[in-house]
Image (tube, rainbow, N blue to C red):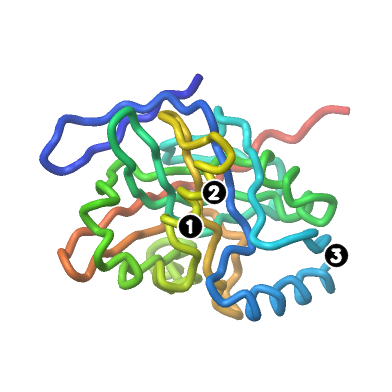
Amino acid sequence: MTTLTFEVADRDPVQVTISQLLNAGYAGRDQGKVQAHIDELAELGVPAPSTTPTLYPVSPYLARQASEVDVQHARTSGEAEWALVITDDDVLLTVACDHTDRDLEVHGVAWSKNAGPDVLGNQAWRLADVADHLDDVRLRGWVGEGDDRRLIQDGTLGDLLTPDYWLEVLRDRGLHRPGTVLLSGTVQMIEGVDQFAERWEVELSDEVTGRVISQAYDVRAMAQPIG
């Protein structure tokens, strides 16, 4: 099993052995906009879900805190998200990037989620410490670096279904237990920015406290297969 370590203010580092990894999808708070997005994806060949929001189980070993992500081809990209991490005695909130195979996505979203890692931040906040202003926490993503670094996603947690919503889903399904990690689904990408980049960076910014959690990784092509 994968064990991740999170730095949390005012306490010792928290180690969590990941037993369950879940990716939410189509999880915008405005479900009218979600349906418009589904219609756009359908034109690209991505099958529509039978219900929204969705929740996809992902192999737990794909939860990583990484500076590099290996990919099989050039059509993969990240998604800026928040993640809940359930520990023995608390619920933590961190930033995450769901790295997805876009070619495989047209054959099945669940398959595409299992074809790349969920990269989580090395730091985390206690969910209770930000609960009173969660909607104002900013979620952003960038692609590239240096002069080529471009903002590709910019929203707030108020754009997405709440952590409390997903915690209730976990309770209903018997999954609210230590070792469960849930990613939130993502916010809209900015038009005209190439998502198929060699570097992704994501960030949660709490403008009330001034605290920031960020994580960045390089996208590295694997060797060409033989056969």
Question: Could you tell me residue 73's position as x and y percent?
Answer: 71, 46
Question: Could you tell me residue 48's position as x and y percent?
Answer: 80, 63
Mark 2 or 3: in front is: 2
Contact check, label 1 and label 2, Cβ < 8 Å: yes
Residue ID at (14%, 35%): 11
Which residue type carries mark 3?
Gly
Q: Closest to the observer: 98 or 103?
A: 98
Mark 1 or 3: in front is: 1
The residue pinned by badge 1 equals 165
Q: Earlier in the sequence, mark 1 or mark 3?
A: 3
Question: Could you tell me residue 195's position as x and y percent?
Answer: 60, 64
Image quadrant where residue 150 sits: bottom left
Which residue type carries mark 2?
Val
The residue pinned by badge 3 equals 45
The quadrant the C terminus occupies is top right
In the picture shown, does residue 162 fall above or below 191?
Answer: above
Image-based side of 123 in relation to 201, left or right: left
Which residue type carries mark 1?
Tyr
How many other residues sit within 10 Å of disc 3, few (<14), some (14-19) or many (≥20)?
few
Contact check, label 1 and label 3, Cβ < 8 Å: no
In the picture shown, does residue 186 fall above or below 214?
Answer: below
Mark 2 lies on a secondary structure that is helix
Image-based side of 127 in relation to 64, left or right: left
Mark 1 lies on a secondary structure that is helix
How many other residues sit within 10 Å of disc 2, few (<14), some (14-19) or many (≥20)?
some
